[in-house]
Image: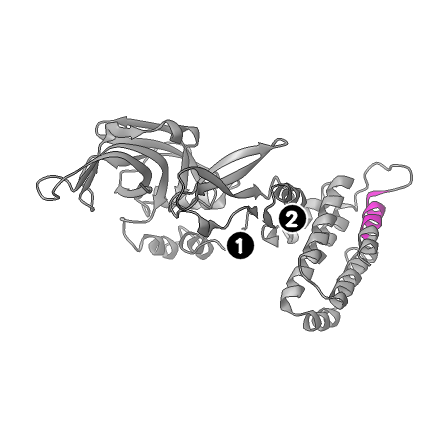
């Protein structure tokens, strides 16, 4: 039987910093005329990966984790620790919504194993006797449907935060590089689960689900947090698993990040990783020969004049020539190389007569020559 979801309006109690207590399920008759017996909850698998999601979205990172889950007094109770703002901004937003009383509900996702049907009049339509808990989710219903609107209008959340909760996240993802292994349409809609694995000491997420007509779990995608995974190394890992890679959004290369990189030194390996990523952007952009040549003119310009701006008339003329889609890709390349050059203003210890900037120039020239 497919996974089932049940929403419960509950009392929310703060028990510690960033930790709230919820009643996830009771034995009360729900709006579907069904009852879930608390003693029937099977929790072993959930406790191995005690995720707290937003709106049952298995494709996004969890917003928190259950540090305690227990059965008792005809209810299933949770203590949920929310991720902090620095770790996951969306988790912080939802935490504030619960604290402010704008969210008052949670929803359990479970697979029923044993149940008893009734007449729906003198007895419940169905009573679940044994059920496996998959996850717990924060949801905006059945509390006031306008709760999130009210929170936005009162200033509890910003317009950007409101959109992040009410609109689906589109690729490329903001905080994660993505590696698709299988088409999600090949899977049963409610079967996805997210867990973690490590590769060379770095954690990444695995999204798994049941293929249509099957009962076993199959890997559908990998997600790599961009704060710990460079685009180049994530792409390399994805390639070894025959996946299709897409880097996270490039806001990470805007001024704040570049400023931070001014204050840090880059190793030669990090420089090469960034350059390899730039090469990948061009290679996967299906650029024409003329556009490719122009792309390398931009790169050579950046290498010769670090920190200088390209004149506006050149930018506008080039933009009209290559088209909007290619222009956006080339802007990413420009930002990548400028970040590299800015960061290498601080010299690392020299090896023979080379400094970091000369190494970057040499690598770039070698890449360009290999494409002629």
Q: Is residue 309 above or below residue 47?
A: below
Mark yes or no: residue 267 visible: no
Is 123 on the left or on the right of 342, as rendered? left
Nearer to us: label 1 or label 2: 1
Q: To which quarter of the image does residue 314 belong?
A: bottom right
Q: Is residue 349 above or below residue 253?
A: above
Magenta span includes 208: no
Is 103 on the left or on the right of 352, as rendered? left
Q: Residue at x 37, y 57 (%)?
A: 153
Q: Residue furthest left?
A: 122
Number of numbered tags placed on the structure image: 2
Name the element at disc 1.
loop
The magenta region covers 355-364
Q: How busy is the neighbourhood of tag 2: few (under 14 within 10 Å), some, or many (20 plus)?
A: few
Q: Residue at x 74, y 46 (%)?
A: 343
Q: Residue at x 86, y 37 (%)?
A: 350
Tell me residue 64's x, y (percent): 43, 37
Disc with the residue nearer the chain's start (1 vs 2): 1
Nearest the eye: 358 or 94: 358
Task: Give the labeled residue for mark 1.
Answer: 171
Q: Is residue 133 above or below residue 158?
A: above
Tell me residue 72's x, y (percent): 25, 26
Magenta span includes 362: yes
The dot on residue 257 is 2
Q: Residue furthest front?
A: 213
The dot on residue 268 is none
Chief secondary structure of the magenta span? helix
Q: How busy is the neighbourhood of tag 1: few (under 14 within 10 Å), some, or many (20 plus)?
A: few
Tell me residue 248's x, y (percent): 58, 50
């Amino acid at each position: 039987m497919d996974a089932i979801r049940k929403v419960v309006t509950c009392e929310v109690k703060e028990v510690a910093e960033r930790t709230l207590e919820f009643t996830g399920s009771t034995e009360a008759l729900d709006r579907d005329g069904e009852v879930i017996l608390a003693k029937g909850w099977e929790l072993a698998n959930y406790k191995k990966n005690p995720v707290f999601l937003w709106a049952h979205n298995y494709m996004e990172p969890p917003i928190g984790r259950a540090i305690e889950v227990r059965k008792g007094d005809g209810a299933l109770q949770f203590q949920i620790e929310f991720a902090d703002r620095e770790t996951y901004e969306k988790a912080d937003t939802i935490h504030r919504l619960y604290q402010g009383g704008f969210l008052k509900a949670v929803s359990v996702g479970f697979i029923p194993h044993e149940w008893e049907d009734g007449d729906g009049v003198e007895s419940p339509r169905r009573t679940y006797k044994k059920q496996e808990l998959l996850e717990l989710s924060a949801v905006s219903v059945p509390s006031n449907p306008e709760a999130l609107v009210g929170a936005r209008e009162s200033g509890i959340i910003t317009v950007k935060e409101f959109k992040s909760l009410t609109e689906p996240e589109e690729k490329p993802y903001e905080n994660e590089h993505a590696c698709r292994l299988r088409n999600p349409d090949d899977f049963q809609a409610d079967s996805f689960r997210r867990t973690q694995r490590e590769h060379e000491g770095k954690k990444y997420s695995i999204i798994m689900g049941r293929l249509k007509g099957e009962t076993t779990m199959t890997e559908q995608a990998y997600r790599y947090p961009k704060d710990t995974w460079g685009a180049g190394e994530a792409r390399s890992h994805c390639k070894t698993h025959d996946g299709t890679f897409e880097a996270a959004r490039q806001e990470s290369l805007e001024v704040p990040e570049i400023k931070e990189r001014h204050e840090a030194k880059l190793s030669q390996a990090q420089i090469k990783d960034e350059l390899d990523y730039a090469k990948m952007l061009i290679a996967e952009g299906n650029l024409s020969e003329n556009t490719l040549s122009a792309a390398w003119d931009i790169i050579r310009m950046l290498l010769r004049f670090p920190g200088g701006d390209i004149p506006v008339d050149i930018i506008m003329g080039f933009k009209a020539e290559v088209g909007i889609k290619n222009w956006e890709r080339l802007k990413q390349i420009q930002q990548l190389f400028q970040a590299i050059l800015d960061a290498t203003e601080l010299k690392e210890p020299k090896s023979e007569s080379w400094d970091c900037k000369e190494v970057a120039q040499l690598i770039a020239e070698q890449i360009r020559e290999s494409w002629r």
